């Protein structure tokens, strides 16, 4: 047993000597962080989905008009129809963003989902104030989302 310990001690000493001999202090210094930039393909993919999201957002005045007219049946149909894929497309864009921007984009997509659900609930309850508040929250969430989407 003592012979085994001796051999183990020598082997560990050899590994330590090799480790110290082949490492350099320059390798231990942290490297400077380089600014993250998106590749052209990434931006093209992100912009393709972002343009779809913007096209949906361009139709928001129609939703606002339906809310102001208190036409909740068509407002709910609008939420489930033309705006049905809004959150999916937002999450698709968020997946391609850098981690710090991804977190903001995912939070914005959750806020959009909450606002759309609140609009739907307000339509069921025929509650104008709740619908108007949800519409405002919907716009704020999309503003937050587009603030982190890279421009082409």
Image: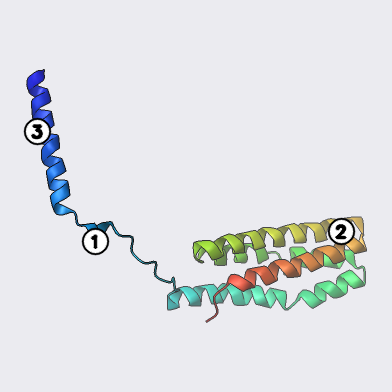
Q: CA distance from mark 2 to mark 3?
A: 76 Å
Is 121 or 76 nearer to us in this picture? Answer: 121
User: Regarding mark 2 in the picture, which secondary structure is present there?
Assistant: helix
Is 103 or 88 nearer to us in this picture? Answer: 103
Q: Earlier in the sequence, mark 2 or mark 1?
A: 1
- Image quadrant in which you'd find residue 121: bottom right
Left or right side of 26 for 48: right
> At x 63% / y 73%, what residue is drawn?
146
* Image quadrant where one finds the N terminus: top left
Q: Which residue, given by chain and number where applicable, does mark 2 sit on? A: 122
Q: Which residue, given by chain and number where applicable, does mark 1 sit on? A: 26
Q: Dot 2, how many residues are within 10 Å of its Cα: few (below 14), some (14-19), or many (20+)?
A: many
Which of pointers 2 and 1 indicates the residue nearer the eye? 1
Q: Which residue, given by chain and number where applicable, does mark 3 sit on? A: 10
Residue 15: percent from left, percent from top: 14, 41
Left or right side of 30 for 101: right
Residue 120: percent from left, percent from top: 81, 59
Q: CA distance from mark 3 to mark 1?
A: 28 Å
Residue 88: percent from left, percent from top: 62, 62
> At x 76% / y 61%, what residue is drawn?
115
- Image quadrant in which you'd find residue 76: bottom right
Which of pointers 2 and 3 indicates the residue nearer the eye? 3
Q: Earlier in the sequence, mark 3 or mark 1?
A: 3
Q: Earlier in the sequence, mark 2 or mark 3?
A: 3
| Cβ–Cβ under 8 Å for marks 2 and 3 | no
């Amino acid at each position: 047993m003592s012979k085994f310990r001796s051999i183990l001690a020598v082997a560990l000493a050899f590994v330590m000597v090799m480790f110290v001999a082949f490492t350099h202090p320059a390798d231990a210094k942290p490297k400077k962080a380089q600014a993250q930039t998106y590749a052209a393909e990434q931006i093209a993919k992100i912009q393709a989905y972002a343009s779809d999201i913007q096209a949906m957002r361009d139709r928001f005045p129609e939703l606002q008009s339906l809310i102001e007219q208190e036409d909740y049946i068509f407002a709910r149909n609008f939420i489930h129809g033309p705006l049905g894929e809004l959150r999916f497309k937002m999450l698709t864009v968020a997946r391609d963003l850098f981690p710090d921007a991804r977190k903001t984009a995912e939070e914005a997509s959750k806020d959009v989902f909450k606002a759309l659900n609140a609009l739907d609930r307000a339509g069921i309850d025929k509650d104008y104030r709740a619908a108007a508040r949800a519409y405002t929250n919907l716009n704020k969430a999309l503003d937050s989302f587009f603030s982190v989407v890279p421009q082409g």
